[in-house]
Image (spheres, helix red, strand yellow):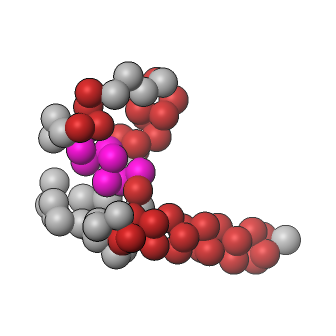
Amino acid sequence: MKVAWDYVWNILIAIDQLGNALLGGWHDETISSRIGKSMLKGGWASTVPWPVWLYDHFIESVEPDEGWGKGY
């Protein structure tokens, strides 16, 4: 069953990355990472009153080696 779940998880990540690319983001970065970076840099996402659990998700999802802000 783990193999099936890994397959589904990989497809979900690919869809997330595709969505980010379609919105003008880096092709190998998730939407959550992009929002997290915006929050940390004081961008538009930092002005939204996110629920704590979602805020934590975005911050934990930041991929410093991906996206336009590499090395963040």
Q: Name the residue nearer the viewer: 62 or 16.
A: 16
Residue at 69 percent of width and 77 percent of height: 7
Residue 17 in sight from this viewpoint: no
Q: Position of residue 23 (x, y in %)?
A: 35, 64
- Looking at the figure, which quarter contains the C terminus? bottom left
The residue sitting at the front extreme is: 23
Residue 7 placement, left or right of 57: right
Q: Name the residue nearer the viewer: 56 or 48.
A: 48
What secondary structure prevails in the magenta region? helix
Q: Is 26 located above or below residue 39 in the figure?
A: below
Magenta residues, start to end: 32-39
Q: Position of residue 2 (x, y in %)?
A: 78, 70
Residue 9 placement, left or right of 37: right
Residue at 75 percent of width and 69 percent of height: 5
Residue at 24 percent of width and 59 percent of height: 64
> In the rendered structure, does residue 27 fall within the stretch colored magenta?
no
Residue at 38 percent of width and 22 percent of height: 49
